[in-house]
Structures are given as C-alpha cells and as structure tokens.
Image: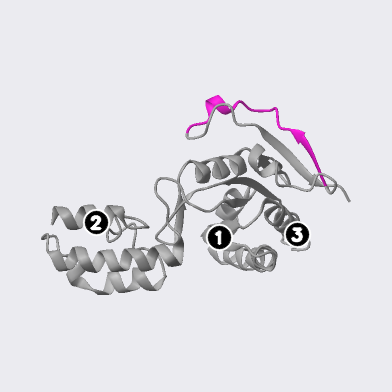
C-alpha cells in the first residue's frame, strides 16, 4: 500500500485525488470517482489506490492540475454589483431575481466571447478565468458597458471588477490559492464602475489602448490573504 501511495505521488496531477474537494468538478474523471463507491471506501485497498491512480492521470490530462501552484497561467476576473444586496432587501426576491437574470444576460456573453470561462456565480457577481489579461480586461469593459443599458426601478446597476494574473491551483472544477484571494480582494476594494488590476495583469495589457493609474486609497498590508507589496492599478480603455 505504501509503495502504491508513493507511486501515486510520483504521477502527474493531484496525488490527493479522490477526496470530496478534488472530485467536485463536472469532468469525466470526477464523475466516475463519485459514482464508484468502492473508490471512497475508507479501508486501504490496493484496488482503490490503483483505480485512483488511473483517474488521477485522466483528471490531470483534462484539468492540468499542478503541484502546489497550477501549471498554467490564467487571468482571474471577479465582478460585483455595488449596493445590490441592500437594494434586494427592500424589493424582495422576485424583483432581485429578475434583475439578476438581466445582469447575467449582460455580463456573461462578453466573458464567453473572449474565451473566458465562468467558474462560479457569486450572487450578483461572477468568477471567471481567461487565457490572457487583455481578454479579461476587454470582457470587463464590455460587461460594464452592456450593464449600463439594463434599467431598474430605483436602483442603478454599477459594476466593479478585479483582475489578477497568476497560476492558481485548479481542483474539482474550481480554482484555489493566493492568486484567487488577490483577485477577490481587488473587486472588494474597487469603487463603483472601477476596474482594478494587479501588477501581473498590467504587464499583459496593451498600453496603447489601456490607460492606468495607481490605486492609492488603501494599504494592502491591512488586507488579509494577499501579499503586502502588491501594486494595484485602476485601468480604463483609452478610446
């Protein structure tokens, strides 16, 4: 059994594949692992380790799970609607749900059109990943523009966004790690209609078409879960 475990640790992919976190995704390997009850038997059986090893390789090929950090650089986008939660308390669930449907119809197509993938919906916001910083920024700008055309009674829809580029850990159809924390904190610190980008994202933007200025209204050392020396910028299209 110990030899089999060592062999699994040497294989590409997530050597912990098989626990509830790692098989939460919608890919084929995760689905098979959830359905195969014997793979989740608490007793240490050689067949279980061999089966998990095979699924681990399959999962590695489909999700490219790395060790520690991911093996693929992506740009993470988080969006949020300013003041939505307070407004929803007053109007009730039916009206709030109606607005959220319109928000999704405005925000998600620009993401998909620029090779982005919606990882999860976060109430009035989304978490998405893109293959490049420029694609993520263009999607955020387009989503903000489309959202301005959505009209509601007594509430102005104002999008804020945070973008960070790194190598987060892909696991179970989700992304985890410090890079995800950074992107999530960026959107929390953004003002209404503001797009905040980290230094790593800024490096991948077209400076001829994007203008930036330093965001100086907060100190990162006071924000939990992110590096204290992180530089943050407000980004806007030049045209």
**Horizontal and vertical percent position of residue 87:** 61, 52
- Disc 2/disc 1 C-alpha distance (Å): 55 Å
Tell me the residue at 75%/54% (across/down): 141
Q: Are marks 3 and 1 in contact (CB under 8 Å)?
A: no
Residue tagged by mark 1?
92
Picture disc at residue 7: 2
Q: Give the residue drawn at x 69%, y 68%.
A: 113
Residue furthest right as drawn = 239
User: In the figure, 226 relative to 33: above or below?
Assistant: above
| Label 1 Cα crowd, 10 Å radius (few <14 / some 14-19 / many 20+) | few
Mark 3 and mark 2 lie on one chain; the one further toward the N terminus is: 2
Label 3 element class: helix
Quarter holding the N terminus is bottom left
Tell me where the magenta segment starts and ends, as one range.
210-224
- Give the quarter of the image for residue 13: bottom left
Residue hosting label 3 = 142
Q: Is residue 45 left or right of residue 164?
A: left
Q: Nearer the viewer, mark 3 or mark 1?
A: 3
Real-space Cα separation, disc 3 to disc 2, in angstroms: 48 Å
Which quarter of the picture shows residue 12?
Answer: bottom left
Q: Which mark is residue 188?
A: none
Comes first in the chain, label 2 or label 1: 2
Give yes or no for contact between labels 2 and 1 (Cβ–Cβ under 8 Å): no
Give x and y (percent) for residue 45.
Answer: 12, 64
Magenta segment includes 158:
no
Of marks 2 and 1, the one in the foreground: 2
Left or right of 85, for residue 136: right
Tell me residue 221's x, y (percent). 54, 25
Question: Residue at 44% across / 67% down in the picture?
Answer: 62
Seen from the viewer's position, the closer of residues 36 and 84 is: 36
* Viewer-nearest residue: 100 or 127: 127
Element on which disc 1 rests: loop
């Amino acid at each position: 059994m110990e030899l089999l475990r060592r062999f699994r640790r040497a294989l590409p992919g997530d050597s912990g594949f098989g626990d509830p976190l790692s098989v939460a995704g919608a890919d084929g390997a995760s689905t098979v692992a959830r359905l195969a009850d014997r793979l989740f038997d608490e007793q240490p059986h050689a067949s279980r380790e061999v089966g998990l090893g095979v699924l681990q390789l399959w999962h590695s090929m489909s999700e490219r799970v790395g060790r520690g950090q991911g093996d693929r650089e992506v740009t993470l986008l988080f969006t949020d609607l300013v003041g939505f939660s307070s407004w929803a308390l007053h109007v009730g669930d039916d009206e709030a749900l109606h607005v959220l449907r319109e928000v999704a119809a405005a925000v998600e197509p620009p993401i998909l059109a620029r090779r982005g993938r919606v990882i999860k919906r976060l109430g009035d916001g989304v978490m998405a990943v893109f293959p490049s910083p420029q694609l993520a920024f263009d999607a955020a700008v387009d989503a903000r523009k489309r959202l301005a055309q959505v009209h509601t009674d007594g509430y102005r829809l104002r999008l804020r966004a945070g973008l960070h580029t790194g190598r987060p850990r892909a696991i179970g159809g989700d992304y985890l790690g410090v890079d995800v924390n950074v992107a999530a904190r960026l959107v929390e610190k953004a003002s209404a209609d503001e797009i905040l980008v980290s230094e790593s994202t800024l490096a991948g933007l077209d400076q001829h078409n994007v203008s930036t200025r330093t965001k100086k209204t907060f100190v990162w050392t006071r924000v939990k879960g992110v590096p204290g020396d992180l530089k943050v910028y407000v980004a806007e299209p030049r045209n």
